[in-house]
């Protein structure tokens, strides 16, 4: 057994034990099996072929349950948070009905349906595990460090292969190709920004090291959609950072721009990226090709507005509708996550998913304004980074079937945790005996008594 495999097993054991005392370590354990799934790495051959990811998810579930049993005192969610939690349940109910009654084949639909159910459960677990600023930091760092490890292996140890001008052969659990990897890494970039703006000096230093590693993977994947998504995220970040936050936002964008220019200054990276536009392997992904796929998807939605279950387009009806636009292919994706959501779970499923993300954004905006009014500029800018992560994820999903991937559930769960930690106090919680204490401002001062914040498990 290699030292790397031994270190990984040690990490699994340490995080499993630590999660019994603090639930976010269960999330870190889950991500250890997500980013470093053994069979995807050279050191994994020495380990048994087990369902590591599922096992880690079960440990995370137990950790959250134990945390709730130890200290069940949590202020009731405000109406905005309730809407998001309710929408997650309704998304699952809709998928269940479509899967059982409208899918042409239960066998074909089953895999996607089961994944959706798992991701909804994961959403609730992540949200429930965040009860304090420290918890939120732990959850964010687990996401960023896992992505940075992939960046380290690719950048320093030269893992993966360049095929058709893009990085292949590197992934994570549920990440099958360069485009999906680019979508994941692009979504993580704004989350790293949240730690940079909100964190202490040593966290800023850590992000200064991790950020370029993550960004380099996006560039090597040569995904036009991911690059456009990062630009959209940066624009969203700048627009949502108002008032005193704008100065910090400008500084962060300048630093990110310098890092990007430094990476793009490598002629090999520029050469690899330029091949995206003329690679024979990617002709189906050209603008004209995508329009044909999207036309086929729209025709399917027209004929099946309530959806056709998991893999409804790719495996069940792709051949029929692609033939209608002159493409001879048996099983191909629609190359658009928004359209794919409608194809699989219906127009109502697409609307529910957009409401799920949209309400999370509006809730975060409200929390940002609350924090800005208290002088918590760093906390407010962190919220802007979370909104930028949603924008990055959605734009990347326009160019590939990524809207149903699990990092699309991570970010709303982070937003729910962010609202619990930094949101406007819930007056109902005071009536029910939930402890409320004067909030601590950015400089450690006790704020006026009229500005109370609810505690999560007694921790402010």
Image: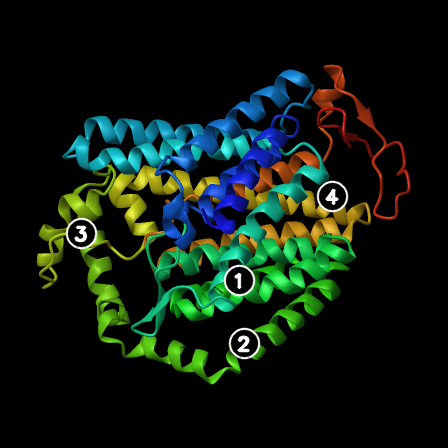
Depicted 417 relative to depicted 371: above or below: above
Residue drawn at point x = 47 percent, y = 27 percent:
58
Q: Which of marks 2 and 1 is in front?
A: 1
State how far apart marks 2 and 1 are (Cα): 14 Å
Residue 221 location (% of width, % of height): 40, 67
Depicted 212 relative to depicted 170: above or below: below
Identify which residue, 164 or 161, lies in the foreground.
161
Chain-order first, disc 2 or disc 3? 2
Chain-order first, disc 4 or disc 2? 2
Residues packed near mark 1 inside 10 Å, few (<14), some (14 to 19) or many (20 plus): many
- Looking at the image, which residue sits at the far front? 1
Name the side, left or right, on which 291 lies relative to 198.
left
Label annotation for residue 197: none
Q: What element carries label 3?
A: helix
State how far apart marks 1 and 3 are (Cα): 43 Å
Identify which residue, 164 or 52, lies in the foreground.
52
Name the side, left or right, on which 323 lies relative to 362.
left
Q: What element carries label 4?
A: helix
Residue topped by disc 4: 370
Residue drawn at point x = 27 percent, y = 71 percent:
286
Residue topped by disc 3: 299
Chain-order first, disc 1 or disc 3? 1
Residue topped by disc 1: 152
């Amino acid at each position: 057994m290699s030292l790397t495999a031994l270190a990984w097993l040690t990490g699994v054991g340490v995080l499993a034990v630590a999660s019994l005392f603090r639930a976010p370590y269960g999330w870190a354990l889950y991500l250890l099996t997500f980013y470093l799934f053994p069979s995807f790495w050279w050191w994994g051959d020495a380990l048994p072929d087990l369902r590591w990811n599922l096992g880690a998810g079960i440990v995370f579930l137990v950790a959250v349950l134990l945390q709730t049993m130890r200290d069940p005192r949590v202020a009731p969610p405000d109406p905005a948070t309730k809407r998001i939690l309710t929408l997650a349940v309704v998304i699952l109910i809709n998928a269940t009905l479509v899967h059982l009654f409208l899918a042409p084949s239960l066998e074909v639909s089953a895999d996607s349906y089961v994944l959706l159910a798992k991701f909804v459960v994961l959403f609730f677990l992540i949200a429930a595990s965040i009860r304090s600023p420290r918890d939120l930091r732990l959850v964010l760092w687990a996401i960023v460090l896992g992505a940075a490890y992939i960046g380290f292996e690719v950048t320093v140890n030269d893992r993966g292969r360049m095929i058709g001008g893009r990085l292949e052969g590197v992934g994570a659990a549920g990440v099958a190709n360069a485009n999906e990897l680019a979508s994941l890494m692009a979504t993580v970039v704004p989350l790293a920004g949240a730690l940079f703006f909100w964190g202490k000096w040593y966290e800023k230093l850590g992000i200064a090291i991790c950020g370029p590693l993550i960004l380099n993977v996006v560039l090597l994947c040569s995904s036009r959609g991911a690059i456009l998504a990062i630009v959209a995220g940066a624009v969203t970040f700048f627009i949502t950072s108002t008032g005193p936050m704008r100065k910090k936002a400008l500084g962060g964008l300048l630093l990110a721009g310098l890092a990007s220019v430094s990476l793009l200054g490598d002629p090999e990276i520029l050469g690899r990226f330029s091949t995206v536009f003329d690679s024979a392997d990617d002709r189906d992904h050209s603008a004209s090709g995508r329009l044909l796929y999207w036309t086929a998807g729209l025709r399917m939605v027209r004929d099946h507005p309530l959806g056709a279950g998991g893999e409804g387009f790719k495996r069940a009806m792709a051949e029929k509708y692609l033939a209608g636009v002159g493409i001879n292919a048996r099983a191909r994706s629609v190359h658009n996550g928004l359209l794919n959501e409608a194809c699989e779970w219906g127009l109502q499923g697409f609307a529910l998913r957009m409401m799920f993300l949209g309400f999370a954004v509006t809730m975060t905006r409200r929390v940002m304004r609350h924090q800005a009014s208290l002088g918590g500029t760093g906390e407010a800018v962190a919220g802007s980074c979370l909104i930028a992560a949603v924008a990055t994820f959605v734009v990347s999903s326009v160019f590939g079937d990524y809207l149903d991937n699990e990092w699309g559930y991570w970010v709303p769960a982070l937003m729910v945790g962010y609202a619990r930690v930094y949101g406007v106090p819930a007056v109902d919680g005071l009536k029910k005996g939930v402890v409320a204490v004067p909030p601590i401002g950015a400089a450690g001062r006790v704020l006026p008594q009229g500005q109370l914040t609810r505690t999560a498990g007694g921790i402010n």
